[in-house]
Image (cartoon, rainbow, N blue to C red):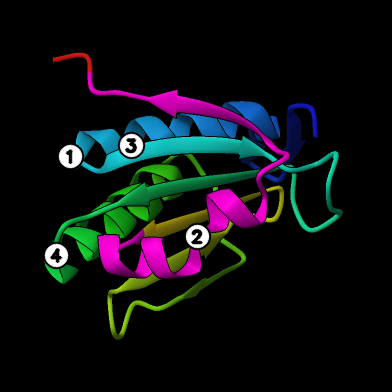
Amino acid sequence: MKYQQLEGYHFLESKELAERIAELALEKKATNVITMHVRPLTTMADYFVICSGETSTQVKAIADHIVFELKSARNRPLSTEGLSNKEWVLLDYIDVITHVFQPHKREFFALENLWGDAEICEFKDEE
């Protein structure tokens, strides 16, 4: 999706949005932050962003930060799931689906293995 204007809303291209989400996750000290280009493999989305937070508090903080920062740029998720248990939060931005896991849930669901043919890009904190 290229840049669009719709009644004051600004939508980022899916790759840019995935990269921005990864950067926002790092701002809240998320670990093992990756983007997966899944568009060649599915019509579900263009990208997955996957990251980990060590505790339920950190998982919620990461998800809340992403939603808040993107909302202030007029990008809102279509839906959110998992905020009640905070072990796996899913943020659906249509072309980009974000998964914020606690490590044990990330290991259990192993999305990186399930979508193993996807192109993966790792993001690290520059500090």
Q: Distance between the residues labelled 2 and 3?
A: 22 Å
- The residue indicated by pointer 1 is 29
Q: In which quarter of the image is residue 119?
A: top right
Tell me the residue that label 3 is attached to. 24
User: Is label 2 or label 3 in front?
Assistant: 2
Neighbor class of circle 4 (other Cα within 10 Å; few <14, some 14-19, many 20+) is some
Residue 82, compared with residue 3, is above or below; it is below
Q: What stretch is highlighted in magenta?
A: 101-125
Please tell me which of labels 2 and 3 falls first in the chain: 3
Q: Which of marks 2 and 1 is nearer the N terminus?
A: 1
Q: Give the mark toward the camera: 3 or 1.
A: 1
| Residue plotted at (28% across, 67% down) | 104
Identify the image quadrant of residue 126: top left
Q: Mark 2 points at which residue?
A: 110
Circle 3 crowding by C-alpha within 10 Å: few under 14, some 14–19, many from 20:
some
Name the residue nearer the viewer: 38 or 73.
Answer: 38
Residue at horizontal 58 percent and vertical 52 percent from the top: 113
The percent position of residue 114, horizontal first and vertical second, equals 64, 57
